[in-house]
Amino acid sequence: MTQIDELQHRITAALDRVAQGVARIEERAAQAAPAPVTPEIDPEEVARLREALEDEKLANAQLEERVRKLHESHREELEAARAAAAQASEAPVAAAPSVDVAALDLDMQRLRQSNEMLRATNDELRKALAENVGEPHLINKAMLAELEGLRAARAVEAAETRAIIASLDPLLAAAAQSEEVN
């Protein structure tokens, strides 16, 4: 048993030395560890940053108000335009000058006839040229047909222009009237 007591005593002494060594290491670590540094706060810098933040908040609020007002005015303008369009569509149709559909139809028939005459004359001219027979009266006839076709096309364009103007006049008058009211 003496041997066991001696081993136990040696183990206890070793554990005491280990505990003392750990205590010394902890002391050195505590002494060597720097104390946590608290940053120095500059009160002037904080005041300046707070002032800049307040300025930005104010500018943001002003911009939001401008956007709200723009949306509101845009909505009002849109409603006014819709009301004017509705009012213009309800304008009396009797005031609008009527389009002369019969004259337009006559001009269209004249254009069709002159184009048919031009096609027929060109066919005759083509046949004469294929036979190497140049006939001056066919050339004259083709030129007359082409001139008549141009005149008829011009008449149709003029009639269409008159029809467009006749349909736009009441709309323009209604728009001018609604602009005067506003």
Image (cartoon, rainbow, N blue to C red):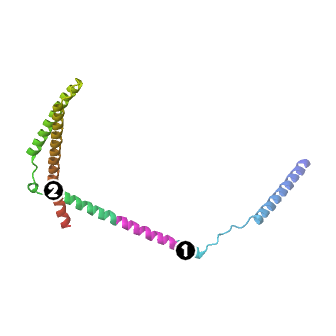
Residue ranking furthest to the top: 131
Which residue is at 83% across, 56% downward?
18
The dot on residue 27 is none
- In this rendering, position of residue 43 left or right of residue 122: right
Local SS, label 2: helix
Please provide percent x and percent y for residue 102: 8, 44
Mark 1 is on which residue type? Answer: Arg
* Nearest to the observer: residue 135 or residue 127: 135
- In this rendering, position of residue 12 left or right of residue 150: right
| Quadrant holding the C terminus | bottom left
Residue ranking furthest to the right: 2
Give the dominant element type of the magenta stretch: helix, strand or loop: helix
Number of callouts in the render?
A: 2
Compared to 123, does 169 lie above or below? below
- In this rendering, position of residue 81 left or right of residue 7: left
* Nearest to the observer: residue 85 or residue 116: 116
Please provide percent x and percent y for residue 82: 22, 58
Question: Which comes before the other along the chain, label 1 or label 2?
Answer: 1
- Whether 56 is among the magenta residues is yes
- Whether 97 is among the magenta residues is no
The magenta span reads 50-68
Reading the image, the residue beneath label 1 is 48
Instruction: Report which quarter residue 129 is drawn in.
Output: top left
Mark 2 is on which residue type? Answer: Asp
Please provide percent x and percent y for residue 7: 88, 49
Which residue is at 18% across, 58% downward?
172
Which residue is at 33% across, 66% downward?
69
Q: Between marks 1 and 2, how big is the CA–CA gap? A: 65 Å
Reading the image, the residue beneath label 2 is 169
